[in-house]
Image (tube, rainbow, N blue to C red):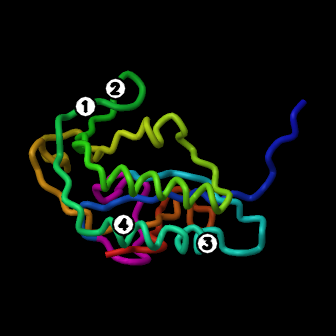
Amino acid sequence: MPARNTKPLRNLIFVAFVEEVAEEQVFLRTDWPLHITLVRFDADASTGGDPAAAVAAAADAPARAALGTMLRIGEDAGFGRDGSVPVSLVEAQPQLQTLHEELVRAVSGQGGRILTPYHTLSGYRPHVSHRGTTPDTKRLRPGDAVVLGRIALVDMAPGGDRTIRRILRLWR
């Protein structure tokens, strides 16, 4: 039987928020501000250092370089099992793809483990998930313009609490 991975891991994610947020902001897992996922990963927390700080430092230059990039929202699609998660696709944009690839390199260079390998690099499909399922669903519409103005590193379980999220680093 293979040995189980017993290293303490920290579940982190890089996102580009399309709504206003603040450094150290905490929100419920069910109440994410609208965002584009850039890279989701686990970082090894057993080394004694702060893996989030190391990854944030490695991501600093690419995040700063991408700020101000204009994005356009494309068509709606369905992600997840049976296409049941409604999303707004982000039209292909070279600077966004470059940011994604550089963040993947930053994470990998710090020993991070990408959680969605089939959805990275050439498989990356940037999108903004809709929030809610009623007529007042929070979402973006095809043709909307978005400025890449808030890139963040988010802790998916601060203090081990998987019901909340915390912004650890925010580039503006």
What is the crowding at mark 3: few (fewer than 14 residues within 10 Å), some, or many (at least 20)?
A: some
Which label's residue is closer to the chain start, 3 or 1? 3
Q: CA distance from mark 4 to mark 1?
A: 23 Å
Number of the label disc, if any, that sits on residue 54: 3
Would you name the residue on which mark 2 appears? 83
Number of the label disc, if any, that sits on residue 131: none
Q: Percent position (x, y) of residue 11? A: 59, 56
Verify CB contact (< 8 Å) between mark 3 and mark 1.
no
Number of the label disc, if any, that sits on residue 151: 4
Number of the label disc, if any, that sits on residue 77: 1
On whether residue 29 falls in the magenta region, the answer is yes
Question: Horizontally, is 89 left or right of 11 in the view?
Answer: left
- Seen in the picture, residue 91 relative to 151 is either above or below; the reply is above
Which label's residue is closer to the chain start, 1 or 2? 1
Given the image, on which type of amino acid does mark 3 rest?
A: Ala
On whether residue 77 falls in the magenta region, the answer is no
Q: CA distance from mark 3 to mark 1?
A: 35 Å
Front of the two marks 1 and 2: 1
Question: Horizontally, is 30 left or right of 117 in the view?
Answer: left
Extreme residue toward the top, this view: 82
Given the image, on which type of amino acid does mark 2 rest?
A: Gly
Magenta range is 21-36
Residue occupying image coordinates x 51% and y 51%? 40
Which label's residue is closer to the chain start, 2 or 4? 2
Which label's residue is closer to the chain start, 4 or 1? 1
Verify CB contact (< 8 Å) between mark 2 and mark 4.
no
